[in-house]
Amino acid sequence: MRMSIDVGGTFTDLMVDVPGHAATMFKSPTTYPDPIGGILGAIELAAAARGVAVPDLLAETEILFHSTTRAINAVVTGKAARTALLVTEGHPDILLIREGGRTDPFNYRTPYPAPYVPRSLTFEVPERVWADGRVHRPLDEEATLAILENLKARQVEAVAVSLIWSIVNPAHELRLAELLEQHLPGVPYTLSHKLNPTVREYRRTSSCAIDASLKPIMSDYLRTLKQRLEERGLRGQIFAVTSQGGLVDVADLAERPILALNSGPAMAPVAGRHFAGIEGASTAIVTDAGGTTYDVSLVKDGALPWTRETWLGPIYQGNLTGFPSVDVKSVGAGGGSIARVDSAGLLQVGPESAGSTPGPVCYGRGGTRPTVTDAAVVLGYIDPAFFLGGQMSLALEAAREAIRRDVAAPLGLSVENAALAILDLTTEGMVNAIEDITVKQGIDPQDTVMIGGGGAAGINAVLIARRLRCDTIVFPDVGAALSAAGAMMSELTTEYSSIGFMKTTAFDRDRANALLAELVGRAQAFFDKAGPAARDRRIDLSIEARYPSQVWEIEVPLRGARFDTEDDVAALIADFHARHTDLFSFRDDGDAVEIMSWRALARCRLSDPTSIRLGDEAQAAGAVSHRPMFFRETGLVEAPAYRLEHLPENTELHGPAIVDSNFTTIVINPGARAVRRPGGHLVVHSAA
Amino acid sequence: MTLEAPVSTPSTPFDGVKLAIMQKRFDGVTRKMANTLLRTARSGVINTARDFSCALVTAGCELLTAADSYPIHVIGGADLMARAMLDIHPEVKRGDAFLHNSPYHGNSHAADHTILVPVFDDDDVHRFTVVAKAHQADCGNSLPTTYMGNARDVYEEGALIFPAVKVQSDYVDNRDIINMCLMRIRVPEQWRGDYLAMVGAARIGEREIMRMGRELGWDALTEHARQWFDVTERQMVEVISTIRSGKARGTCTHDPLPGTPAEGIRANADVTIDAAAGRIVVDLTDNIDCLPVGVNLSHACARTAALVGVLNSLPRPVTPNAGSLRRIEVRLRENCVVGIPRHPHSTSVATTNLGDRVSNAVQLAMATIDPSVGMAEGGAALPPSAGVISGRDPRNGHAFVNEVILAAGGGPGTPVQDGWLSLFCMGNAGMPFYDSIEIDEMLHPMMIETRKILTDSEGAGAFRGAPGIMTAFRPIDCDFELGFCSDGTVNPSLGTRGGGNARPAAQYLESDAGEVVPLSTSEHVHVRVDQRVVSLSNGGGGYGAPETRDPARVALDVAEGWVSPARAREVYRVALTADLAVDGAATAALRAGCEAP
């Protein structure tokens, strides 16, 4: 049996999957400050549902997947460890100056962002290595020891070490590590060249600082999690989800906690790719619509979207993780986004959100400003009497009044038309976000399928798809817990890389082969550690390269692990040109190619990549209710509302209609068609 | 047009939903254009420092959107360029594209090559013009730099000038023009690649607008522009109505150069705010004539610099377009150093130096009229830390020439916030990227020894300017040449409303033996292997009296090393305890002694 736990900001999602049986899904409120309480709460629900005791359930669990927003929350709320930064003398402001850049050119009322580590905890170490690795100035150990004494006195909880050109010659960083072990034993530290061996000192330093600052809290948390679950009977392994969309052993994560920063959202495309594949599509727009954010990502040709630029916080104002991650774009639009009319008479929706507290007006928890969810209730899409499977009833009249007062009256519209306008504008913001990630990569949304994940996806997914001219939307039955489901489908991965500059006009096959052999060796050691359960072992080798005088590299997969002949080199060069054309629409055949780094992605599976699906509830099929709904095309209309788990398979239904489940509501607009597939998911044709 | 009275609310309410949605789609068109340019350009100044802009104007040559663009590039120039295109070529056709870089016909300066493409509906009616502009790595100047600060005229400047020259017909290049460029622009293949990227971006914009026209109806697009202009004009009227009315002059002075008056070049901005009428006038006519140097402003830059000064100063941001800008009138004079230049005066450096002085003068004037608006003066652009280095790399024998973007001016204090550190200059609004130390050292035989903020260099204030940045760099295993045309060495950025001036910029060469060679504002020098270039950039001026600054902010500045404890005490009148907390009683005593400034 496998379990997947996703600790979110509001809810802790749990999926339980027993091979040969249907999966089950549970939600329990996340607990603060100790999230382990929420995890145990969800496990207790699962145990009760199966009629067993918690220790028995845990004893049956072979593998437990775990993703959490704990690391990112610590960064965002400034609760990470008190961290010192050691840098090369002359460069104390790497984290302050960043790489420049600014948005919103006429607004000088935004404060300049503070560095991730304050200047008062940044220390300049006398030393310097130059670009070719030569030591321009030796490490001054006496001065270093004085700095370490200062760190002790300042009671720092973690240390980040990031020196200029340590990726070419790490001697000084390594020596600093020895001195730290001696003089500050027990204080965790991170070396930039080991964590993230990439050129560009800001990115490397930023990732180093973030990683070091997470070590104390994440190490403690992971240790406690393991201990408490084992006390309650867990015997299996715990794997942590990474921002890279893979899995690592929790012990490895404690060593490099930055890997887990954005682990939740990274799993949505993993799950999305799976459900797109079931429908025969390899390119998919994966959407995850929550209460405050709308996360979108693009799976292209079956590959997860990847970025080397991940910002924590707003672009140019937050901190760059300097680390590759699954590329998930978030916009501030969701069920809780607040609608208002500004002083110029323009309708605005979001980014301000009512969140879960006080929440939309219809929750009746003190919210007074109308939200997208309130619009959906007013339009009759969400059944006020059966929200979240009837766990909560909604205040329809209060929602109507809020929309009338804040939107309909100022715009001179009826309440229903005001609600439609709110959905239209929200839709436009989401469409923009999707166009950003599709058009940018030369993808026409028309040629993709859309995956509707998250509790709020179904409200306007058809409208979004129509604007994008995208015909097919897939709503997975596990869509409301897309991340937890994704973790179960994921692979165990770790990436290794080496810096090794080489120009193709002077390609050194022996050196290339040696670099690759070393990477493959490290990958093999990783497989050995993963144990005998690790199957489908694969090592993806690639280079990062560019044309001369370019400064941004692109990644090109290698065809093999060795360069035996010049033909192998020629093939690599051809692959680079092709990849460059694919990404940027042009190539420069006459030019040499410069290889900057060599990479190996080791991956294996822990179990069969079976489909995770929920069971059908044993209730009488065909229970259909009718309720009044409002659409632009029809006005007020009495339309059917179906239960998703009762829909007969492969039978088409036509909009206007609603398909409800305990976790979500899917609107089938007039003209759209929907069909429930044998896999349990709903496929909607938008008739774009 | 008449601007006497504020626009009254129209009798028929506009559709706020439709307007907002359609404007997002137009903004999206410029984003798609920008993305194409960034990803396909060949030169670092475009694909790394992203020195480019994209805009859309209507058939009537009104600016519709310039989302995510450098302000100085397009806010007050895209319309002038489209107009010049139509004046010179009354018969534009589908498939035409125009290469335009003439500062005498609405462009910013000669280094900013621009591609203009008129967009037609299915009945061949001209509906919009798309604009893609990018700063070139080279534009054929007489020296290998795009900033010819000391050029006495356009002939000495040397740039090829294209006054809206038709470079494509029926979507096909005029090879003659391309061939001419390939013979007169350095690193010609790089230029050609950047040219293709610009044409590509413009064609993407054309395609997107045609899609919108066919989907939504061409008349709807035109009607949208009309309504959108009205809405944003009303937004501008409303924002102006919250400002005090009044009249004031702001004056900022560019450092002297060979050929300018000894006291430098003064830029006077006479600003009149009429809150009741919802109107702001910036008059730049009381300024000296064009000078035999490269820092004269072009028509577009003079107008834009004045507009930028106003837009920066407003109490809340208003999107600039032909509608909102109806409410800001800029008065310019022919043959004026900050007006409309007369050919052949050179405008090689029009986008940064004197343009910034104009924006700053407007900001100071606005602050004089109303203490809740305006800004102090921002730090100067293009010090040696943003200079052009050239030479031969001993590692591979290749010649190199490149503008490094290590640091430049710091941002000015505002009525509510401290200055933005990585401003670069007012006209670029902090949007350029700053170079990575490691990337610069990898690409060039240089070592950047130091890049850090300068303690106590900020213009003090209730809201202080950002500090300057100290940069030190040197050649490695060779000598190299360095060229730069800066400002702020003689005339630092000014504070306002009691705020202090920033520390002046300074630059010098220092040898390993300790010999120091001072450098002036604009130089081209040889740097020996045993020398380092030291560049102290200009921070921003302060806003409001420093002794009224929130003591907690002062304490943080001291803890973070931006301000020394002595300066905190003497200038900000804040006393700190040994652990750098605010000593409330001692601070009150200090401040009591300096009341009534």
Image: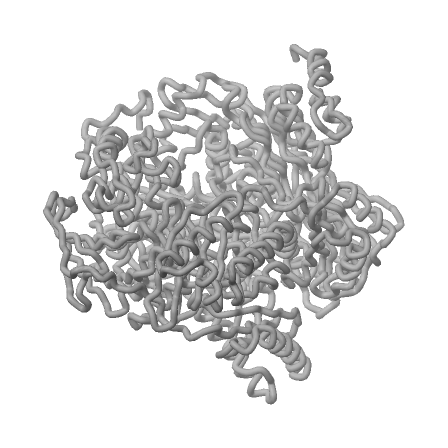
Q: Residue at x 41, y 29 (%)?
A: B328
The residue positioned farthest toward the bottom in the image shown: A565
Q: Position of residue A618 (x, y in %)?
A: 22, 62
Name the quadrant of the N terminus of chain A.
bottom left
Towards the viewer: A339 or B20 = A339
Tell me: residue B514, above or below residue B97: above
Q: Position of residue A265 (x, y in %)?
A: 44, 56
Q: Is residue B149 visible?
A: no
Tell me: residue B451, above or below residue B290: below
Q: Residue at x 19, y 35 (%)?
A: A415
Tell me: residue B415, above or below residue A619: above
The residue positioned farthest toward the right in the image shown: B513
Q: Position of residue A596 (x, y in %)?
A: 62, 69
B484 sits to left or right of B2: right
Q: Position of residue A35 (x, y in %)?
A: 50, 48
B381 sits to left or right of B178: right
Q: Is residue B273 visible?
A: yes
Towards the viewer: B381 or B77 = B381
A358 sits to left or right of A655: right
Tell me: residue A453, above or below residue B74: below
Q: Residue at x 40, y 70 (%)?
A: A302
A25 sits to left or right of A70: left
